[in-house]
Image: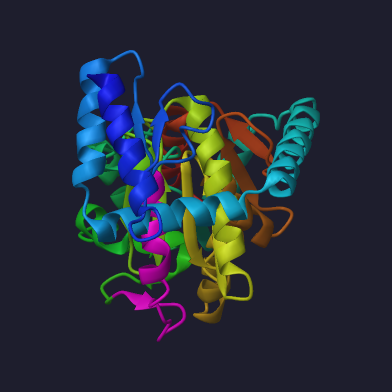
Amino acid sequence: PLRDGMNLVAKEYVACQREVPGVVLMSEFAGAAPELGEALRVNPYDEIGSGAALERALDMPLDERAERMATLRARVARNDAATWSERFLAGLRDAAAAREGSGRLAPPPPPVEELATAYRQADHRLVCLDYDGTLVPLASRPRDAVPDDGLRELLAHLAADATTTAVIVSGRAHAELEAWFGAIPGLWIAAEHGAMLRSPGNEWASLHAGADTAWKDRIRPILEEFADRAPGSLVEEKENALAWHYRLVDAEFGEWLANDLASTLDAQLGGTDLAVLRGSKVVEVRFAWATKGEVISTLEALGVRPDFELAIGDDRTDEDLFARMPDDAWTIHVGRGSTRARFAVADPAAARGLLALLADGASSGSR
């Protein structure tokens, strides 16, 4: 039956190939199978499943056939041998750079007594805190990383001090951060890596009012295509950004797809004011001006002039924040990895413990 079905497909294709777009059936064991997501993948040893795939191909609407084939051809044309080899070599260079960086001395833990004294004696403090991976552990699904009551109480304690400007600086959407932390008096919140800011008691404002987000209609299908190719991944839409999360995808396959997606997006976004951001298990498209360092510039423009600055973060986006701060600022990286931060702590629990110590010391001590 399988041989007869194959013959039927072959005859139909030969007769109609000039008028009807074809459908690619590919063994799921083929090396190119993960990349050619529009093909119908089959297990060649499964006769029933292969027969069902043949039937689906024969019954597929012509517009869907044309769309799949056009996407496949475009990808094959774009990812030719030269492109593939350059991406492969770039991966080797990145791996070599990461290996070289791993040999550097890791930042030391912060000197707690010295930090606590500087915090307590400051006239005005600025405290910038990342959220995911810094105040809470990274979760397989972003929506599962919900703040607990203890974290809300800690942030409320920090923000209640009139001499402290406490800011959550996160890549999260503003609606999510508002729901979690909007009721905390005195707390500043920056969303989408600094694209939007909310000062205490005020409405959200874009740091670049009138930014055109029509580009999302062009970029969204690309991210959705990669989500289809990687079960467990998902596309998140924010007001000023789009993100592809792949924390539930096989680690090696996910990194391979992320490299492919980043390469594809870089080609699409050339000459625009958009940038591709590689975070922790996420590839995000955002405005190039939307960085966490931009938050510092905005606070300075609003008159925030601290004599003590502390920033805590865990991933690539927080390096922009560390870079924007003065050399004597207390910059702290959470976890392992290369960083420009002066100090490092092991995990979110250690970061929260340090913040609790500072907040308690400031409220109980004297300057």
Residue 350 in the image: x percent, y percent? 47, 29
Give the tally of numbered discs: 0
Q: Quadrant of the N terminus?
A: top left
* Residue 341 sits above or below residue 334 on the image: below
Q: Residue at x 69, y 29 (%)?
A: 108
Of 96 and 81, nearer the camera is 81
Q: Is residue 317 visible?
A: no
Q: Residue at x 59, y 41 (%)?
A: 332
Q: Is residue 4 visible?
A: yes
Residue 41 in the image: x percent, y percent? 35, 31
Q: Residue at x 46, y 41 (%)?
A: 36
Of 39 and 88, nearer the camera is 39
Asked whether, in this view, residue 299 is left or right of residue 151, the answer is right
Of 209 and 23, nearer the camera is 23
Residue 247 in the image: x percent, y percent? 40, 34
Query: Magenta segment, which residues?
Result: 204-227
Asked whether, in this view, residue 174 is left or right of residue 365, the answer is left
